[in-house]
Amino acid sequence: MSERLVIDPITRIEGHLRIEAQMKDGAIAEAYSAGTMVRGIELILRGRDPRDAWAYAQRICGVCTVVHAIASVRAVEDALKYPIPQNAELIRNLMIGAQYIHDHVMHFYHLHALDWVDVVSALKADPKATSGLAQSISSHPLSSPGYFADVQKRLKAFVETGKLGIFQNGYWGHPAYRLPPEANLMAVAHYLEALGWQRDVVALHAILGGKNPHPNFVVGGAPIAISIYPNHPGRGKGPHYRGGQGGTALDVTGLARIQEVIRSMKSFVDQVYVPDTLAIAGFYKDWFKQGEGLGNFLCYGDLPAKGLGDTASFLFPRGAILDRDLTRIHEVDLNADDQIQEYIAHSWYDYAGGRDQGLHPYKGETKLDYTGPKPPFAHLPVEKAYSWLKSPRWKGRAMEVGPLARVLMLYAKGHEPTQELVGMALKKLDLPVAALYSTLGRTAARTLETKILVDAMQGWYDQLVANIKAGDVATFNEALWDPATWPRKAQGVGFMEAPRGGLAHWIVIEDQQIANYQAVVPSTWNAGPRDPAGKSGAYEAALKGHAVHDPKQPIEVLRTIHSFDPCIACAVHLVDENAAAYETRVL
Ligand code: NFE
Ligand code: MG
């Protein structure tokens, strides 16, 4: 059987992604990944004040709501050699950590779990047995038979209306679902709990950055003062109260609230997310054998203890792993002209110097060139251009970025908590280390790094409190705020590890304005199309070889694609409102 499988759009992700798979004898012979929308931030940024860039760049995405702002302020700070106070670094770490924990839990339950959890089967569960199961894997307090009976009743009422709402269009009853009804009911209960929990945890962003999504940032520090005065009486104390003199500075009330949020994050991750991941994964061990793809992994590194200049102090290390060789970590230089380059041979762009060359982002170009067919059409012209994503490469190689890359890097570098966690998970699941190179390995890595981060949050918080106690309340450095102090020409790179992987913004500043701005984001690395040599990116490589049981319900494709947590809004980040392109969206 040779047919073309088309999934467009893939749902439960951010943005529009189309996957085409050329089938042969029931398995995927070749896969093609296409970003089908185009937006426009890199062009919008040209000519603007670099100090404003973060506010525009941040709108690249509403899911990873802090990461583009952080990459942007870091790019400007790198270009201007602009140092920031340690408290600002700690505040940024806390905000990045909160972003991960929020994003990863939401991904697991709301974007990915239903690839493994059959909601309709949960109706057949025995609440008492579900309670027994829940209590056998965790001390999470919401675990009584009455609690699960109640969740089941709510679910039943929902299903009986015939309007499944958030559970619409699942492949319910597909034979690939393997959890017993009780495990399905437990997971549905936690799906609903996570919805409420996430509302509370984003309060951390509101306390430190004024709001969520899209909290505030500032070049030169953090846009929040620290107040050592006692709480101002008489101000509102609602859930979004930021605490403090005048209600804007961070004071004892705000700090106490942050501590509360960190505790709530920790208990949900320890008692719900980690045990659920291991319990669900145990029923799908064959998914630890397929879905890896490239075997090359790239990390920029992040979460500095002593400032970004000291890469050795990063919690998440920098480096590249090639061909699964964990004994050799390759050095990565984000400024080197011949390391990171973006290609467009199969993308709807043009380069002045020709379509087959790779450009380092300092010299990057953003020129739309839609050459595809007019919609509707049956298949993408995959021999030519077929995506709005570019193809980033490191020393010419396609690389996977994200949780799996980070966990492998931590593991390879001998980070003890990671080695213990990975060891614990593999032992529980009775799997070898090689099982990490897979669809569920990627999903499990996301869970394990969340555990590492939730523990790190307390350390950053304690350090911030200790600094304040010692009299250090600086959060902003105004030394280079005045553009008159800047060189006429400067360039810099702002990098970070976003939840989906290594993210960097490259900025060129001339005459106090942005002359060029290029963002290369995690989903571009993973979801990009083929390069001039015909080499696939991570999504395409990961799908190759998958057997698809029922082409009308291609749950196997969803499992592997969702394991990357795609975000196409991030990956395209560019707008041309006059482009005659299909699916053009102007945001
Ligand atoms: Ni829109 Fe993003 C993250 C970035 S994309 S979610 O994490 O950058 O890959
Ligand atoms: Mg870009």
Image (cartoon, grey):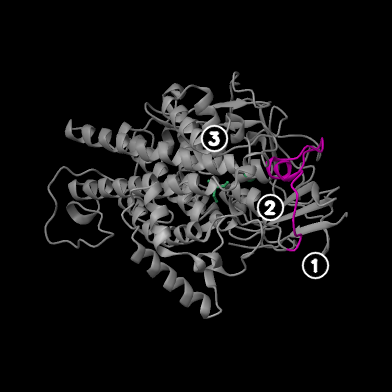
**Do the numbered discs 3 and 2 sit on residues whose CB atoms are within 8 Å?**
no
Report helix, strand or loop for mark 2: helix
Q: What residue occupies the far right of the structure in this picture? A: 1
Residue of label 1 = 376
Magenta segment's dominant SS is loop
Q: Is residue 328 magenta?
A: no
Q: Residues within 10 Å of mark 3 (few under 14, many from 20)?
A: few
Q: Where residue 385 sits in the image (x, y, percent)?
A: 80, 49
Nearest to N terminus: mark 3 or mark 2? 3
Can you tell which of label 3 and label 1 is closer to the viewer?
3
Q: Where residue 153 sits in the image (x, y, percent)?
A: 42, 73
Quadrant of the image containing the C terminus: bottom right
Say above or below: 369 vs 50.
Answer: below
Q: Residue at x 48, y 64 (%)?
A: 125
* Magenta-drawn segment: 529-552
Mark 3 to mark 2 CA distance (whole Å):
23 Å
Can you tell which of label 3 and label 2 is closer to the viewer?
3
Say above or below: 61 vs 496.
Answer: below
Q: Residue at x 46, y 24 (%)?
A: 311
At label 2, the amino acid type is Glu
| Camera-side residue of 153 and 328 | 153
| Camera-side residue of 464 and 563 | 563
Nearest to N terminus: mark 1 or mark 2? 1
Residue of label 2 = 556
Give the quarter of the image for residue 259. Answer: top left
Quarter, ligand 2: top right
Residue of label 3 = 430
Q: Residue at x 39, y 62 (%)?
A: 128
